Amino acid sequence: MKTQKTYTGKFILFLSLLCLVILVNLSLGSVDIPFKSIFQIIVANDSNQETWRYIILHYRLPKAITAILVGSGLSISGLLMQTLFRNPLAGPFVLGISSGASLGVAILVLGVSAFSGSLVGFAFSNIGFAIAASLGAFLVLSVVMIVAKNIKNTMSILIIGLMFGSFTAAVISILAYFSSAASLQQYVFWTFGSLGNLGWNEIIILCTITLISIGLLLTMIKPLNSLLLGENYAISLGVNLKRTRNLIMIITGLLTGVITAFSGPIAFIGLAVPHLTKLIIKTSNHKIILPAVAILGAIIMLISDIIAQLPTSEYTLPINAVTSLFGAPIVIWLLIRKRTPH
């Protein structure tokens, strides 16, 4: 009972911090909006300042929801990969899915100079980026799944995923070498990542896929916990290893693919947040760690967005740069901490 109370207290703290960070995220930017006005706009859809209402409902609220979904989705994906491969350095991008999404966008943007007219406008639109990234991610995931059918060793799948990532990176480098400066700049801007380009329709799609993935994971708590002790132990408990492995890869592929498609490749959240959560929660039980990882991932993504906005400034830093600056020291510290005898 004491342990349950401890977890409950930590979840209450997480949720309270999430609410606070959401309010701060909505209030800060090039235009400061008081908390009271934010409540009036969101709860009563009313405000004395029509400009504030427009900023909140059409820009900051969609961006905050996107940050929550992206942070939660990447963190869950990272936890799944670390559980499946039993490798602390595994993240949501180890299967090459993000690289496939990047390749799709690279082919669209860097190869668009061969075309003209309306196709150029479509290629440089959010819809064009999303479709190209989704197709690239789905293609790589499909190939990995086909290869995985003939492989029993999970670590071999990890290596194959990394090789796919290297292969796609090489193709992108070749495309970049022969592309125009304008196309290359457009692609580089996409790789910076962005949380502010999504409309409500895209957010509904992202939210639906995230909720479906979480719903599937809730039916897999026992297999996930069994995998922590090794594949042979999981099989001895009656876990269908092939089915579980395929489901984990499909869920990770869906989450990582759609997030990369809509927001670009965002680094380190999926790698760092699961470690940080386990450090705070002090358990590996997926029944507890899954929701904790999702909440903490959302909090960290919102904080990263606050930092990226450079409060009181009209400039915005690339979100990918902020998450990398935040995530890299955490991963380094965790590795050093694990090697330091207590």
Image (tube, rainbow, N blue to C red):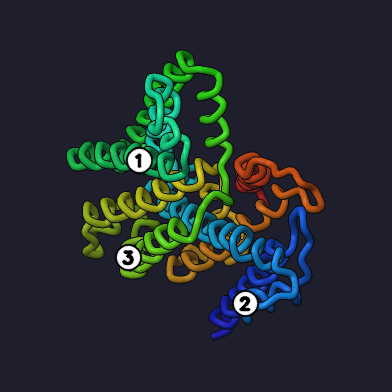
Marker disc for residue 216: 3
Say which residue appears at 56% left-offset and 60% top-offset: 62
From the top left corner, tell me how far across and down residue 173 is, in percent.
46, 20
Quarter of the view holding residue 268: top right
Quarter of the view holding residue 130: top left
From the top left corner, tell me how far across and down residue 110 is, in percent.
44, 24
Q: Amino acid at mark 1?
A: Ala
Q: Is residue 190 positioned above or below 218 on the image?
A: above
Left or right: where does residue 12 sit relative to residue 225?
Answer: right
State the separation of the CA atoms marked 1 and 2: 38 Å
Asked if the residues shown at circle 1 and circle 2 are in contact, with their CB atoms under 8 angstroms apart, the answer is no
Asked if the residues shown at circle 2 and circle 3 are in contact, with their CB atoms under 8 angstroms apart, the answer is no
Disc 1 is placed on an element classified as: helix
Left or right: where does residue 283 sit relative to residue 26?
Answer: left
Q: Amino acid at mark 3?
A: Leu
State the separation of the CA atoms marked 3 and 1: 20 Å
| Residue 95, visible in the rendered structure | no
Marker disc for residue 45: 2
**Circle 3 Cα neighbour tier, 10 Å, few/some/many (<14 / 14–19 / ≥20):** few
- Between tags 3 and 1, which lies in front? 1
Marker disc for residue 137: 1
Q: Amino acid at mark 2?
A: Asn
**Circle 1 Cα neighbour tier, 10 Å, few/some/many (<14 / 14–19 / ≥20):** many
- Between tags 1 and 2, which lies in front? 2
